Image: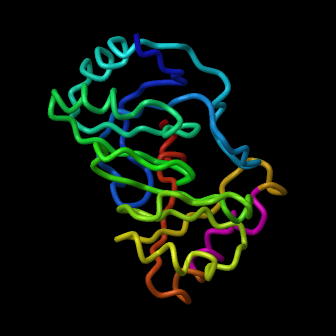
Amino acid sequence: MNIYPVVEIFHSVQGEAFHTGVPHVFIRFGNCNLRCEWCDTDFLTYKDMSLKEIIDQVLSYDCNRVIFTGGEPCMQDLDTIGRELKKHNIHLSVETNGTIKVPEIIDWICVSPKDQLYPNVTIKQRNGDELKVVYCGQDLTLYDDLKMGFKHHYIQPCYHENESIAHNGRSFSLVEKIVKSNPGWRLSLQTHKWMGVD
């Protein structure tokens, strides 16, 4: 039996980047291979769910789009759960840090690299649909090579309740200026936080 560590499964709208405003079912998995100080998810608190339990909950919502997120979702067997969801004509997206290759069954790949925090970590998923960089003041030329493998390029302000963790990435006006002075990048904002939804 396939068992997955699940933090939560919920129906909401995507609040970031390309699919902002589009309803999805989010499957947030536990565990991560990185420990970013500004992460907004408690990925160490989860419950074990069977494949059938997950599929049943997803199908209880009137929605044909699923996002695998985390934690790091690619630590899980996404191929098996993806094949089951595809039987119900569900579009599959993943939000990953890119350190683990994404299975081919995924329809939309968003990589949010954390190599500014972990310079010794290798980004293995070097192509996809979205490259979404959380901006904490790093030099954007770091992503010059990586950008070539993605269709859409986003910079997102680092948001954290603790200003010392968010650094200067918390300033929306600063990131707006960064985007204007770096052609090829677009601004992504976490609109769901402003709306007060998941």
> Is 79 within the magenta?
no
Q: Residue at x 50, y 72 (%)?
A: 146
- Residue drawn at 66 percent across, 54 percent down: 159
Residue 155 appears left or right of 64: right
Q: Is residue 34 above or below residue 80?
A: below
Magenta: predominant secondary structure element? helix
Quarter the N terminus occupies: top left
68 versus 98 height, above or below: above
Q: Is residue 38 above or below residue 28?
A: below
Does residue 174 show up magenta in the picture?
yes
x then y, percent, for residue 8: 49, 24
Image x and y of residue 6, in percent: 51, 22
Residue 33 screen position, x and y as percent: 66, 41
Q: Residue at x 30, y 23 (%)?
A: 58
Figure quadrant of residue 57: top left
Percent coordinates x, y for residue 96 in the rendering: 50, 49
State the count of labels.
0
Q: In this view, does 67 lie above or below 152?
A: above
Tell whether 96 sits left or right of 13: right
| Left or right of residue 126: residue 34 | right
Q: Identify the magenta region.
A: 166-176
Q: Residue at x 58, y 37 (%)?
A: 71
Tell me, what colour scheme is on the image?
rainbow
